[in-house]
Image: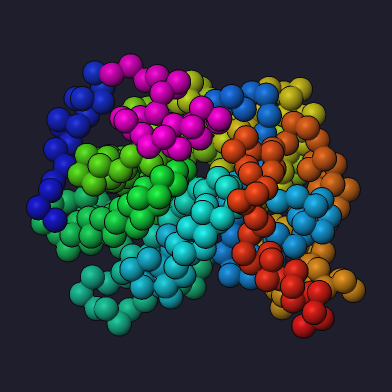
Amino acid sequence: MSYKTDFDALLSELEAKTPDPSRLVTDDPTPNTQRLFEFLKDCYGKKHISGQQYLFESELEDLVYYKYTGKIPAIRGYDFMGISGLGGGYDQIERALDWARNTGGILTMCWHWYAPDDMNDSSKPAAFYYKTTDYDRKTSFDLVRAMTDGTPENDFVIREIDLVAEQLKRFEAEDIPVIWRPLHEANGGWFWWGDHGNESVEAYKKLWYMMFDRMMNHHKLKNLIWVWNGQSSKLAVNANTFDLAGEDIYTDPPSHASQVERFREVSSYTHGKMITLSECGSIPELDEMQRDGAMWLWWLPWWGQFVHENNQDRRPIIDDDGFPRPNPTYMEEDFLCRLFSDERVITLTDLPWYDERKHRLPTALLKNLERIKSGR
């Protein structure tokens, strides 16, 4: 951990450059990273890339898409949650690698970052939800102390950033681009890295800059496309540290509205960077997005109930054919079919580099289809 971020020098360098939305903030990116970025630019404002977030290894969400549309979303979201073993170790890295290697699909990664509740007592559980939330599992981890040199919290965040960077190098070694969305939803106080008032806003920005600096200048990663998902002008970081801006939108009640107000708001302070619906409960209607000019680059519904209908025990309701049913609260069957048959929507096989001779359906989907076929 001898490398230290010189924040003054970094900010001086960043502020000396005019943000350029047409270029990656990563210098000399890998060929596939540049190719993906050019594809994103070609799509922006004209088409929408379909996506889906995953958690459980069964990935039952794919069964819904495949049965009702015959297609699979082009972007797949995974998570570095539990990468260091804290919080249960939900390691999704191998599945992310398998997806990128074998299907030709686009990969995006977020990080529900577990941090200790008590730096002096390892018996206390780690969590990513902050102590002020209503969740049962939460942490008192102090963001301001984490950005103070010489503290155990500072040592912790540096170790964890480096741990993720080492795993990202595995993707880089195979020229697999990663759309990287760390420190998400910072506008809310529900995560420990979020806005808790007072000094936390500046500490959040400092953590963002430290992560950017360590990954770009210390680890020298060349395969990242950065998504800033802070969702507040108050939290805005220098535009030379991200390639896209993301908004996470969950409406109550669920709605297929374009969410144009949020689109315009984030567009107003992100210096012309492309805007994506980086998480959502409901996918907007295509015609509404086009009418309102809210042309989200992609959408990424959350996993589980946001795709398939569940019973009271939160288990998927399975139809007579062995497939989960679409959840009519968020993703009605007719809406889903209409969406994926529209030429404005890009699915896995629509990607320009998709090659049916070497690419295949996702591993979990193939296993589930075989299980259903055999009647297990």
The residue under the point 75% across, 62% down is 63
Q: Position of residue 225 (x, y in %)?
A: 43, 38
Q: How is the image coloured?
A: rainbow
The residue under the point 70% across, 59% down is 62
Tell me if 327 is positioned left or right of 51 in this view. right
Q: Nearer the viewer, residue 49 or 144?
A: 49
Q: Position of residue 247 (x, y in %)?
A: 55, 39
Residue 313 among those drawn in magenta: no
- Which range is magenta? 17-40
Rendered image quadrant of residue 156: bottom left
Tell me if 73 is positioned left or right of 188 in this view. right
The residue under the point 44% across, 43% down is 177
Picture layout, residue 315 above or below residue 247: below
- Asked if residue 329 can be seen in this view, the reply is no
- Asked if residue 55 can be seen in this view, the reply is yes
Q: Position of residue 215 (x, y in %)?
A: 28, 45
Q: Nearer the viewer, residue 230 or 219?
A: 219
